[in-house]
Amino acid sequence: MKTMVKILVVEDDTTLFAEIESRFAQWSYEVYGINDFNKVMEEFTVLKPELVIIDIQLPKFDGFHWCRMIRTHSNVPIIFLSSRDHPTDMVMSMQLGADDYIQKPFHFEVLIAKVQAVLRRVYHYNTDQPVLKKWCGATVDMEKNLVSTDEGSVELTKNEIFILKVLLDRKNSIVGREEIIQKLWDDEKFVSDNTLTVNINRLRKKLNTLQLGDFIETKVGQGYIAKEKEDLSC
């Protein structure tokens, strides 16, 4: 991790932005705001931040729009902020590829903890770990976030590749939901159970393009298991 981490905060509440900037400076994070909410992508491209925090309700276009736009170009981690109390907002955020979701009002200690957890997961999780894993005839590239077979390849988000890694580390064994949540978000009390479900479903959908989705099996009331094909040494 670089000494100074650049964080882009797409937030039109100037008071909240100033507070985030002040609090994050104590952790050696460089916080940047948006000058023109019509040009979020232009400013994102120039800055190249390590993490993006996006409010849902914004001038011109909402946060969902900008998340879609960023995801067409980058897998940079994204955390959503929202003052709206709608479960569908969280589901939508995860489906668009967000890494976490925080509802306003929030404690800054929680925001900082979530940011630190995401940064550790995205930029440190594969330290001293094999970059490539073999699974059911597929090659899982932990560095490039790619799963490849003879039929093609699919790119995963940081969350998805990490979940797959956790399951592959214990192939043919059940990994509990709580264990995955703890590994993924460091502290399960900061994350809803539904968030994990959304990420697992999205992972399966992508793996289905390679006929691998069925090999991630749900064990009701227990967790998930990455199975092996019987006729392959996975």
Image (cartoon, rainbow, N blue to C red):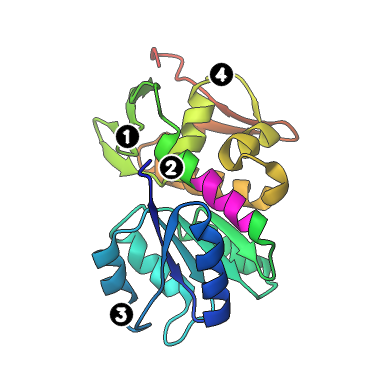
As drawn, the residue found furthest toward the front would be 26
* Residue 97 picture quarter: bottom left
Amino acid type shown at disc 4: Asn
Q: CA distance from mark 1 to mark 2?
A: 10 Å
Q: Nearer the viewer, residue 14 or 10?
A: 14
Question: Helix or strand or loop: what does disc 1 sit on?
Answer: loop
Closer to us: mark 4 or mark 1? 1
Task: State which quarter of the image contains the C terminus.
Answer: top left
- Residue nearer the viewer, 160 or 84: 84
Asked if residue 109 shows in the view, the reply is yes
Nearer the viewer's eye, disc 4 or disc 3? 3
Q: Residue at x 41, y 13 (%)?
A: 231
- Secondary structure beneath dot 2 equals helix
Dot 4 falls on a residue whose secondary structure is loop
The alpha-carbon separation of the residues under discs 4 and 1 comes to: 23 Å
Earlier residue among tags 2 and 4: 2
Residue sitting at 64 percent across and 24 percent down? 174
Magenta stretch: dominant SS?
helix
Give the labeled residue for mark 3: 39
Is tag 4's residue or tag 1's residue first in the polypeptide sequence? 1
Sequence order check, earlier mark of 3 and 2: 3
In the picture as drawn, the residue positioned furthest to the bottom comes out as 60
Q: Residues within 10 Å of mark 2 (few under 14, many from 20)?
A: many
- Do residues under tags 4 and 1 come within 8 Å of each other at their CB atoms? no
Residue holding disc 2: 122
Q: Can you identify the residue that label 1 sits on?
A: 143
Q: Are marks 3 and 2 in contact (CB under 8 Å)?
A: no
**How far apart, in angstroms, are the residues tagged by discs 1 and 3?**
30 Å
Amino acid marked by disc 2: Val
Q: Nearer the viewer, mark 2 or mark 4?
A: 2
Residue position for label 4: 172
Question: What's the residue type where badge 1 is placed?
Answer: Glu
